Amino acid sequence: MYKCGKIRQLYLELTIIMIQTKRFTTAILLIIGLFLAGCASVENRHDPLESMNRSVFAFNEVVDERIMEPVARGYKAVVPDPVEMVIGNFFSNLNDVVVTANALLQLNFPDAAASGTRVLINTTFGMLGMIDIASDVSNASDINISKRNEDFGQTLGRYGVGSGPYLVLPFMGPSTVRDVVGIGVDGYFADPVTSVFTMKRINHSLHESLDAKVRVPVTGLRVVNLRAELLGTDKMLEEAALDKYEFIRDAYMQRRNSLVHNGDVPDIDDEWDE
């Protein structure tokens, strides 16, 4: 389940690169999601777009096999394990900003305080998040500031917005209509690397400079690092799943349902009926 969440994040980062390099707006993500929702048939209410989703899934598999996996293996071979861990910690710290914002939107103040504390500790004492001191503190004491998982898709779900049809989007992979909206909102407003809203209002010229010189390369590094973390799961997926598409779809929907309800999971049919 945890690895499935990382698969989703990998496809998210690939989409962010496309947005930044081609100057797409996040509204396109919303339009795509709503358009696909409108095309849904009633043949399979759990996955009404299965035929189209399988085609996109096959495309994503080819892209991964021919581009992403070889690049990730090269990265893994060249970058020492300690350096790879530092890079992963750095991006995890950036993600804690998104987690903090969404926990506040959900009025989940304990998680917001924990994630905000993580950002503060790791950014200062952890050298901009390169060392995950907050997790060490949590493991060695009764202070629970362990890693949380919140995003705007979960925030919408907490306020009763149904998931909508299951979608597989090019480069983005597993998603739903609700999560497509969540990806756009998080990417535009909350993520420190990709937030157009924040950077433009802090300093417009800095925003333009970072777009060209820093933001895209940093996002690319995040993609490759995430894919490298998933290398060990490839064989497991192939061996565990008679139908890889169904395996990933069911794991994704179950995990998202669990995250939205903080582990107090209703029947999956209830989620689809919302």
Image: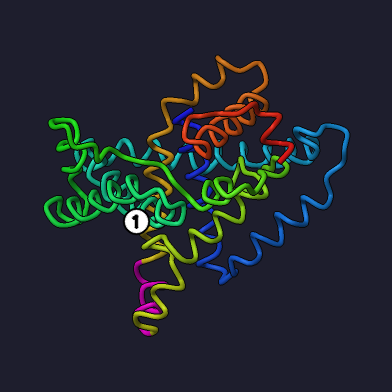
Q: Is residue 89 left or right of 39 when viewed as pictured? A: left
Tell me which segment is drawn in magenta: 205-214
Residue, far bottom: 205
Q: Position of residue 48 (x, y in %)?
A: 80, 37
Measuring 40% from the left and 57% from the top, which residue is drawn there? 101
Q: Is residue 152 left or right of 220 when viewed as pictured? A: right
Q: Position of residue 264 (x, y in %)?
A: 51, 29
Q: Amino acid at mark 1?
A: Val
Q: Position of residue 128 (x, y in %)?
A: 20, 56
Q: Position of residue 68 (x, y in %)?
A: 49, 42
Q: Which residue is tagged 1? A: 97
Magenta segment: does it hold 207?
A: yes
Measuring 46% from the left and 25% from the top, which residue is drawn there? 233
Residue 206 sits in quarter:
bottom left
Helix, strand or loop under label 1? helix
Q: Residues within 10 Å of mark 1 (few under 14, many from 20)?
A: many
Which is more toward the observer, 37 or 154? 154
Measuring 13% from the left and 32% from the top, which residue is drawn there? 141
Count of numbered badges drawn on the protein: 1
Residue 226 sits in quarter:
top left
